Every structure is written in structure tokens, then in C-alpha cells.
Image (cartoon, grey):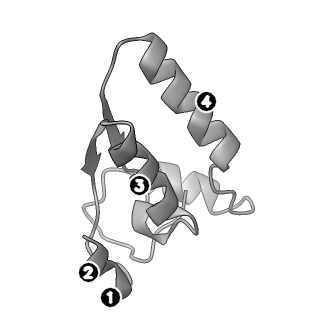
Amino acid sequence: MRCNRACSYCFAKEKLNSYSKQPVKDISLENFNRVLDFLSKSNQNVLQLAGGEPTIHPQFKEMLQTLINKKIRVNIRSNPLWDPNLNEYF
């Protein structure tokens, strides 16, 4: 988990601080797809991307497009200080 802010009111601050002492490790596409498989097997069609800033994941657009293609409703908790190139995508 990582973030491009340090908001005093952040719900994930404690978690982010504990991870700050470790190397940053984004979820892999392989593990992301495992989550999607689990959702499918559980008959769930909603996923929330949160905890840190999801839009700074290097494969964010690819992951979001996969969710859209699979008709999974997505809630994105963002700060929203994303890359301006995402504006057109959104």
C-alpha cells in the first residue's frame, strides 16, 4: 500500500505507517485475478479499491478495465490526486 498524500484524517494511516518500514509491494495482476476468481465463486459483483491511493498502482487502468469487462461494480476510494491522464479515462 502506498499513497501520494499524508492526510491527518486518513482511515488507512496506521496501516500505511506500518508498511512504510517495508519495501512497497503492489498487488500483482496474478493476485488481483485470484481476488476476482474468489468474487466470482462467491457470487459477488462489487469490489472496493482503497487503502492507500489505488490510482497510483502501475497497472490501475488495466485492473479497472478488467473489472468493467467482468461487469463488477467498482468503488474507488481516492484522494483524488491522480495522474491528470486518468481524467479522460474516467
Sequence order check: which comes first, mark 2 or mark 3?
A: 3
Q: Is residue 53 visible?
A: no
Q: Is residue 52 visible?
A: yes
* Quadrant (top left, top right, bottom left, bottom right) of the C terminus: bottom left
Secondary structure of residue under mark 1: loop
Q: Residue at x 41, y 11 (%)?
A: 42
Spatial CA distance of label 4 from label 3 is 16 Å
Circle 3 residues within 10 Å: few <14, some 14–19, many ≥20: few
* Quadrant (top left, top right, bottom left, bottom right) of the N terminus: bottom right
Read off the residue under disc 2.
87
| Three-letter code, disc 4 | Arg
Read off the residue under disc 3.
65
Contact, CB < 8 Å: mark 1 with mark 2?
Answer: yes
Spatial CA distance of label 2 from label 3 is 15 Å
Sequence order check: which comes first, mark 4 or mark 1?
A: 4
Q: Residue furthest right?
A: 23
| Three-letter code, disc 2 | Asn
- Return the x and y of residue 84 as percentages of the image width and height: 32, 88
- Return the x and y of residue 48 as percentages of the image width and height: 32, 41
Q: Is residue 27 left or right of residue 48?
A: right
Read off the residue under disc 4.
34
Sequence order check: which comes first, mark 4 or mark 2?
A: 4
Read off the residue under disc 1.
84
- Return the x and y of residue 67 as percentages of the image width and height: 39, 44
